[in-house]
Amino acid sequence: MTYAVALRLDQGIVFAADTRTNAGVDNISRFRKLHYWNKPGDRSLVLLTAGNLAVTQSVVSVLNEQLEAEPDPKRPTLFTVSSMYRAARLIGSAVRDIRDVDGPALEASAGFAASFILGGQIGNEPPRLFQIYAEGNFIEATDDTPYLQIGEHKYGKPILDRVTQSSMRLGEAAKLILLSFDSTMRSNLSVGMPIDLLVYETGSLDIRQVRRIDNDDEYFRRLSKAWSDALRGSVERMEEFQV
C-alpha cells in the first residue's frame, strides 16, 4: 500500500508520497511514487501514484515514451498540452490504455487498482490539482477541499481536515503533511519511510525543492516527538469525565 497527499495553497502546492510497497509481510520494497516533469519558465507537473505498482509504472512509462517520441501535433504530451486539465485528460487516457491491455487479467485476480494525484502549473493559469481514478476520470481540488489523498489515507486525514487552510505558508503545509504521515505510519505498517517531499511555489514555473525524508531525518524526529508531547499535554489538561 502507499500514502500520498498534496495540498493546493495560495502560495503553491506541497506534494508527498511514501516509498514502501509490499506483497506480504515478508516482501517489502522501496519504489519512488513521486514523479515530476519540469520545463523551466513554461510548466512544472508532479504526479503521485498509488495502487498496483506494475500499473502505475506502466502509466509513467507511457507518459515518458510520449515525451521521447518524434513531435507530432496530433499526439499531445505533458510538454505540449495547453492546460493542467488537458494534462489530467492525457494521464487518464494513458490509464485507460493500460487498462485495455492488462485490465482483464488483473480483474481476474487482484483487480485493476491504481490512483494518481496530478498537480502543477502551465503558463499563466493558476496552479491546479487533480485526482485521477483507475477508470481514467478525475476530480479537481477546490477552495472548499484544497487537498487530495490517495492510498492509505484515513489515519492522516483528521489532522488535514482540522488544520488545512489555503492561506497557509508552504513551510506550514509541509509540516502538516509530515505530521499526517507520522500519524499514518504509527497506525499502518504498509506505509513507511523514506518520504519524498516536493514544494512548488506559485508562478515559479520551476521545481526547486525536492527532498527525501529518511528514518534518521532530524527534523522529522523532532516533529514527531513534539506532536506526541503536544497531544499528551492537551489530553492531560482537558476536564476528566466524571465517573
Image: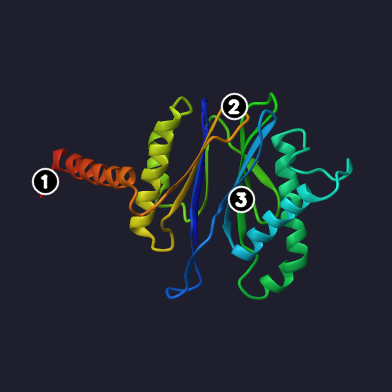
Residue 145 in sight: no
CA gap between label 1 and label 3 equals 47 Å
Q: Residue 243 appears at what percent x and percent y?
A: 10, 50
Q: Nearer the viewer, residue 217 or 184?
A: 217
- Give the image quarter of residue 170: top left
Instruction: Report the side of 243 relative to 135 (left or right).
Output: left
Q: Nearer the viewer, residue 153 or 200?
A: 200
| Residue that label 2 marks | 204
Q: Residue 11 appears at what percent x and percent y?
A: 51, 26
CA gap between label 2 and label 1 equals 55 Å
Q: Which residue does the image show at 37% across and 56% down from the upper left?
A: 185
State if disc 3 and disc 1 touch (CB < 8 Å).
no
Q: Which numbered tag is attached to residue 116? A: 3
Q: Which residue lies furthest to the left in this view?
A: 243
What crowding class fits label 2: few (fewer than 14 Cα within 10 Å), some (14-19), or many (20 or more)? some
Q: Is residue 32 above or below residue 179?
A: below
Q: Which numbered tag is attached to residue 225? A: none
Instruction: Report the side of 164 relative to 145 (left or right).
Output: left
Q: Residue 86 appears at what percent x and percent y?
A: 75, 39
Q: Which amino acid does label 1 sit on?
A: Gln
Residue 91 in sight: yes
Q: What residue type is labelled 2?
A: Ser
Q: Is residue 53 above or below residue 157?
A: below
Count the marks.
3
| Residue that label 1 marks | 242
- Give the image quarter of residue 230: top left
Q: Which amino acid does label 3 sit on?
A: Phe
Q: Earlier in the sequence, mark 1 or mark 3?
A: 3
Q: Which of marks 1 and 3 is in front?
A: 3
What crowding class fits label 3: few (fewer than 14 Cα within 10 Å), some (14-19), or many (20 or more)? many
Instruction: Report the side of 218 relative to 48 (left or right).
Output: left
- Give the image quarter of residue 163: top left
